[in-house]
Image: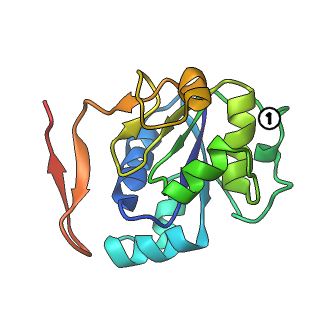
């Protein structure tokens, strides 16, 4: 299974990092990571991780501004994409097909291929059920809902704790 992971500069990069850690332990999952420049700064500020350590968790990493990378094409087969964390700016860009960087272009293509699975906005938005948070044209394609599993939450810079929502 081939999964694209996008991370940007909004708070909550621990969600993307934890996702990469979990997926790295699954033998049949191939991860392709795109981290924005602001995401790289947020990783260093909010967590104990170095950017290189986070990128090492993925099978493949791509420059944020490489709009010509293979991920920008529909011919690159993917099983889904997760954007965690996802700022409102990125969510808006994806919702309106404003693909000015590789992260939003890859999400745009993934939507076109109808394989986008998750965009984490404010750390709790997942694309699986239904929600009135997004415009109607997006919810009909994405089917959004909140994540019902244990999540990571920030309790200040350099500290993360597990919250069990069960």
Whether residue 1 is visible here, answered yes or no, is: no
Question: How many numbered marks appear?
Answer: 1
**Looking at the picture, does residue 16 appear above or below residue 158?**
above
**Quadrant in the picture for residue 63:** bottom right
Q: How is the image coloured?
A: rainbow
Q: Secondary structure at mark 1?
A: loop
82 or 18, nearer to the observer: 82
* Visible residue check, residue 23: yes
| Image spot of residue 76 (x, y percent) | 80, 35
Front residue of this view, candidates 121 and 59: 121
Q: Residue at x 53, y 27 (%)?
A: 139
Taking the spot 40% from the left edge, 28% from the top edge, the residue there is: 131
Specify the quadrant that holds the N terminus.
Answer: top right
Give 101 or 20, whichever is nearer the viewer. Answer: 101
The x, y position of residue 25, in whole percent, is 41, 39
**At 72% from the left edge and 40% from the top edge, which residue is drawn?**
108
The residue indicated by pointer 1 is: 76
Q: Quadrant of the C terminus?
A: top left
Answer few, some or many: residues within 10 Å of disc 1's Cα (few below 14, many 20 plus, some between 14 and 19). Answer: few
Relative to residue 75, is residue 81 drawn left or right? Answer: left
Q: Is residue 137 rendered to the left or right of residue 155?
A: right
Please provide percent x and percent y for residue 19: 40, 45
Q: Answer above or below: position of 44 versus 150.
A: below
Please provide percent x and percent y for residue 42: 43, 72
């Amino acid at each position: 299974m081939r999964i694209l992971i996008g991370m940007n500069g909004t708070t909550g990069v621990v969600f993307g990092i934890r996702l990469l850690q979990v997926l790295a332990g699954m033998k049949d999952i191939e991860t392709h990571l795109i981290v924005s420049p602001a995401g790289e700064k947020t990783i260093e500020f909010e967590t104990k991780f170095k950017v290189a350590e986070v990128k090492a968790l993925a099978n493949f990493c791509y420059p944020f501004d490489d709009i010509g990378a293979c991920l920008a094409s529909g011919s690159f087969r993917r099983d889904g994409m997760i954007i965690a964390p996802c700022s409102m700016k990125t969510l808006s860009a994806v919702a309106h097909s404003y693909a000015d960087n590789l992260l939003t272009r890859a999400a745009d293509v993934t939507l076109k291929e109808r394989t986008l699975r998750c965009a984490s906005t404010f750390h709790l938005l997942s694309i699986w059920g239904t929600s009135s948070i997004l415009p109607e044209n997006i919810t009909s394609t994405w089917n959004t809902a909140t994540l019902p599993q244990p999540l990571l939450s920030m309790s200040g810079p350099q500290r993360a704790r597990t919250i069990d929502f069960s």
